[in-house]
Image (cartoon, grey):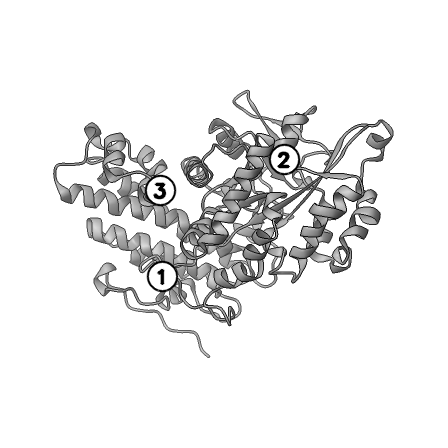
Amino acid sequence: MAHRYLCIHGHFYQPPREDPFTHIMPSEVGAGPYHDFNEKITHECYRPNAEIGNFNAINFNIGPTLASWMARYARDVYTMILDADHAYQEQWGVGNAMAQAYNHTILPLANTRDKRTQIIWGIQDFQHRYGRMPLGMWCGETAIDLETLTLMEEQGITFTILAPWQAAHGIDPSEPYWVNLPNGRRIAAFFYNGPVSGDVSFNDGVTNNADAFVAAYLPNYLNWEKVHRNEDQLLVVSTDGELYGHHKPFRDLFLSHLVQHSAPAFGFEIVTLGRYLQMHPPRYDVEINAPSAWSCAHGVARWSTGCDCTEGDASWKPAMLQAIRQLAARVDQLFEEHSSPALADPWAARDHYIEWRNGWISSASFWSRFGRNNRKPARESQAVRAWHLLEAEYCMQAAYTSCGWFFEDLDRIEPRIDLNSGRCAISHIWQALHINLQSNFLTDLEAARSWRSHLTGAQIYRRLPPVPQPDLLPPLPAASSEPAA
């Protein structure tokens, strides 16, 4: 008897909202009665889904920056989610959590070195939290190219999730495919069902009743040729995890009834992707559209050149991206040049820096692995300089967080978060080397302008919250005139 499998994937993610200088979560307008949106969404989504057992049944990923916040501010919720993966692993021999590339960077827009760091950091974060090597990895916005997939596979990742339009030709989303890689190896790709995932996300009428959803709605999206051939098939529904209770109140209860009662009652077995891959390895190959993503019909233009996925004048997007890239190039050059006296291989050290930064390994262990001559520099000033340079690299990775380019305008909280991360990198370079990168960054940001407030990126930068100590940054150059009110 053929099986019909249903996999619900939830992508749970929040950008790093903490002030990078104070590491304190600021109060956020619109989050009331809660202090900030992480706290609000935890109350509306993460906690109820954990408490009613949804994480025990679904396929999911928790973004590293969200997991880090949870571990600090919502420890009981964090523990319930980890326990859900451990329980699934014990029952089926494979976990139901996936890793995520660390900073939700649009990886096709990153250079090779940054792609590798993002993937390695995501794997290290996952291993620390779940105690195992991840099989699957979620890429921010499912944005991929062949180099990204190749680097993932080289680090031991066996599968990812893509949108159906990321396939270069027609595919059957009821089974996984092999993507052949330039290195002669391959990685598995699951394609979620586009119409069903879209309806679950945006069509409230479809999710009013979980029984009707499975009995009357889902059969419309089965592969009926497989039904007639008595073949197993998989239906993947992939959405933002915050949908279940935050974006859509009570949707967590729909999900609970769906996975615990409705699906089994109407002939669908709830499964996760790692378990399905063990039972049903890919049979066919697929070519992918590269670069491509799940929330942009124009490749990855939404986060680079701008496109009509968002309203208004998108010319600020390439200007801001260029400013961030120019700053990153300057930081990279200084990092490589000035960390070499302390670090045997600066880039290998960066790839493992979060292990030290997050306290997963000791300072002594880090220096024995990555220090020149396998030891910490004899001069403390060299060690402190290397730390500042590594922190600058960490902050620059955060400055590429995709949310900064996702929405319609420059004068929003998301671009400001990215600009503040860039400012933090400037601060660490200033403290390490007394080299001023701020002036050139502000000049580059003049080219980015909000079409709503008419503020330039430089003016928005100047309005960022003050740093705890003025000497953490080089002096600001004279300001250009403010736009007319």
Q: In this image, 261 relative to 415: left or right? A: right
Numbered disc 2: secondary structure: helix
Numbered disc 3: secondary structure: helix
Could you tell me if residue 308 is visible in this image? Answer: no
Q: Quadrant of residue 9?
A: top right
Q: Quadrant of residue 252?
A: bottom right
Residue that label 2 marks: 273
Q: Quadrant of residue 159?
A: top right
How many numbered marks are there? 3
Q: Residues within 10 Å of mark 3 (few under 14, many from 20)?
A: many
Residue shown at 50% from the left, 32% from the top: 152
Q: Earlier in the sequence, mark 2 or mark 3?
A: 2
Q: Nearer the viewer, residue 108 or 213?
A: 213
Q: In this image, 356 relative to 40: left or right? A: left
Q: CA distance from mark 3 to mark 1?
A: 19 Å
- Which three-letter amino acid code belongs to the residue tagged 2? Leu
Residue 135 in the image, given as x and y percentages of width and height: 54, 32
Q: Residues within 10 Å of mark 1 (few under 14, many from 20)?
A: few
Q: CA distance from mark 1 to mark 2?
A: 37 Å
Q: Nearer the viewer, residue 24 or 418?
A: 24
Residue 87 in the image, given as x and y percentages of width and height: 55, 38
Could you tell me if residue 99 is visible in this image? Answer: yes
Q: Earlier in the sequence, mark 1 or mark 2?
A: 1
Q: Nearer the viewer, residue 213 or 384?
A: 213
Label disc, if present, on residue 354 of the rendered structure: 3
Residues under numbered marks 3 and 1 in contact, where contact means CB atoms less than 8 Å apart? no
Q: Quadrant of the N terminus?
A: top right
Q: Earlier in the sequence, mark 3 or mark 1?
A: 1
Q: CA distance from mark 2 to mark 3?
A: 28 Å
Looking at this view, name the residue that lies furthest to the bottom: 485
Residue that label 1 marks: 24
